[in-house]
Amino acid sequence: MAPNFPPSPEPQDILDTYVGLDEGSAERRAREHGWSTVRSLPPGAIITMEYRVGRLNFEVQGGRVTRCWKG
């Protein structure tokens, strides 16, 4: 059986600071703060609901982040 390693801790970040940023700046900031996966989505996008450690999601409208959440 393969070893079961605990997940890496998520970056300590204040998610509200991403709201209002343009999409490119938000993605750069997220990667600089240690997020391994950054996903930009249009409003109302249909997405899977599994939680992924280290993933940051952006809802983007008109090139600006309107919502940000982990997983």
Image: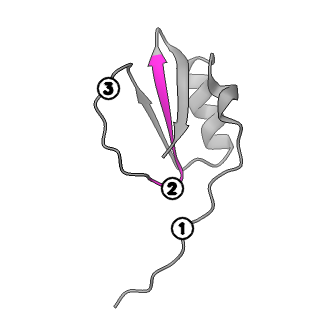
Circle 3: is it few (<14), some (14-19), or many (20+) Cα within 10 Å?
Answer: few
User: CB under 8 Å between callouts 1 and 3?
Assistant: no
Q: Secondary structure at mark 1?
A: loop
Specify the label residue 69 is tagged with: none
Q: Where, by quadrant of the figure, is residue 40 drawn? A: top left
Mark 1–mark 3 Cα distance, whole angstroms, equals: 27 Å
Q: Where is 5 relative to 12, above or below?
A: below
x 58%, y 17%: residue? 22
Location of mark 1 (residue): 7
> In the picture provided, is 54 more to the left or to the right than 16?
left
Q: Where is 28 relative to 3, above or below?
A: above
Given the current orientation, which residue lies at the most extreme top position?
62
Residue 12: x and y in percent read 71, 49
Q: Nearer the viewer, residue 44 or 24?
A: 44
Q: Secondary structure at mark 3?
A: loop
Location of mark 3 (residue): 45
> In the picture provided, is 64 more to the left or to the right than 4?
right
Location of mark 2 (residue): 53
- First to last magenta residue range: 52-60
Q: Amino acid at mark 1?
A: Pro
Circle 2: is it few (<14), some (14-19), or many (20+) Cα within 10 Å?
Answer: some
In the rendered structure, does residue 56 fall within the stretch colored magenta?
Answer: yes
x 34%, y 91%: residue? 1
Lower sequence index among marks 2 and 1:
1
In the rendered structure, does residue 2 fall within the stretch colored magenta?
Answer: no
Residue 25: x and y in percent read 62, 24
Q: Where, by quadrant of the figure, is residue 18 drawn? A: top right
Q: Secondary structure at mark 2?
A: loop
Residue 11: x and y in percent read 66, 51
Q: Where is 37 relative to 7, above or below?
A: above
User: CB under 8 Å between callouts 2 and 1?
Assistant: yes
Mark 2–mark 1 Cα distance, whole angstroms, equals: 7 Å
